[in-house]
Image (cartoon, coloured by chain):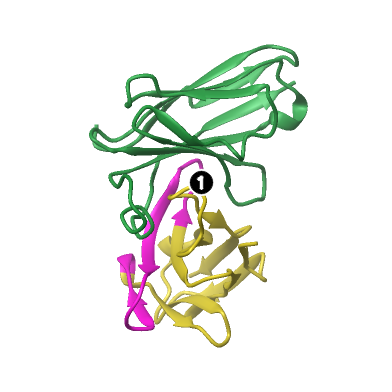
Amino acid sequence: GAGVSQSPRYKVAKRGQDVALRCDPISGHVSLFWYQQALGQGPEFLTYFQNEAQLDKSGLPSDRFFAERPEGSVSTLKIQRTQQEDSAVYLCASSPAGTGPLSSYNSPLHFGNGTRLTVT
Amino acid sequence: AQSVAQPEDQVNVAEGNPLTVKCTYSVSGNPYLFWYVQYPNRGLQFLLKYITGDNLVKGSYGFEAEFNKSQTSFHLKKPSALVSDSALYFCAVRDKDYGGSQGNLIFGKGTKLSVKP
């Protein structure tokens, strides 16, 4: 497929369970981002990868959230011991641009359709 | 700190009429500005961006936006609305001089556009 693919589309978890959300970026895209979108809100930044390196994780809300991109392509966002406040849509986005002060700034992000997580 | 404000939760327009979705921003340096559209149960789709140059930017599906530095605004416009334009619209900003994550976008809360036949 040509776009960013996320799975599963929907996930229901009982409070306290661990979940793993997968993102397949567009082939060859260097940059990968995770965003969290709560109901009625805009997406909020979680973390950023350039290839396999996690360059910014300042948006992760707690140490229960962990993301990886070990081979610089597929990424997984893991949430341990889920809480009700974790319920949201988790969006993945990729961009072909990489390092350098100008290369990423003006590149639009390509978003997946998201994973809707509901914690009961 | 960077921020984006979309003052209207919802905008209602009759088909064929012009539409405007408002956005104002606050950054410490010079901004890169973006508009994205989100259809139900879908991810965000890029519409247009302002980087530098002409203040009027044209994008996908007939949309355009005007960058106004003095008013720190980047309102989205379309001369003639279509029912199919009904969706959620997000304005986003990236501080050109921001020293943090190179790709991090700050999004507004979104504005729901409803176009009635």
Q: Quadrant of residue B54?
A: bottom left
SS at circle 1: loop
User: What amino acid is found at the position of numbered circle 1 in the picture?
Assistant: Pro
Q: Quadrant of residue A73?
A: top left
Magenta stretch encompasses residue B58 = yes
B5, above or below B64, in the image: above
Give coordinates of residue B79: x percent, y percent.
40, 82
Task: Residue B18: tell me if it is visible.
Answer: no
Circle 1 chain: B
Left or right: where A13 falls relative to A100: right
B53, above or below A33, in the image: below
The residue most toward the top is A17
Q: Nearer the viewer, residue A48 or A92?
A: A48
Image quadrant occupied by the N terminus of chain B: bottom right
What's drawn in magenta, residue-wise? B37-61
Residue underneath mark 1: B40
Give coordinates of residue B88: x percent, y percent.
53, 57
Specify the chain shown as yellow.
B
| Chain A: colour as depicted | green
B78, above or below B37, in the image: below
Question: Residue at position x 30%, y 38% from top?
Answer: A30
Question: Residue at position x 58%, y 69% from top?
Answer: B28
Q: Nearer the viewer, residue A50 or B105?
A: A50
- Number of marks drawn: 1
- Mark 1, other Cα within 10 Å: few <14 / some 14–19 / many ≥20: few
Give coordinates of residue A97: x percent, y percent.
30, 47
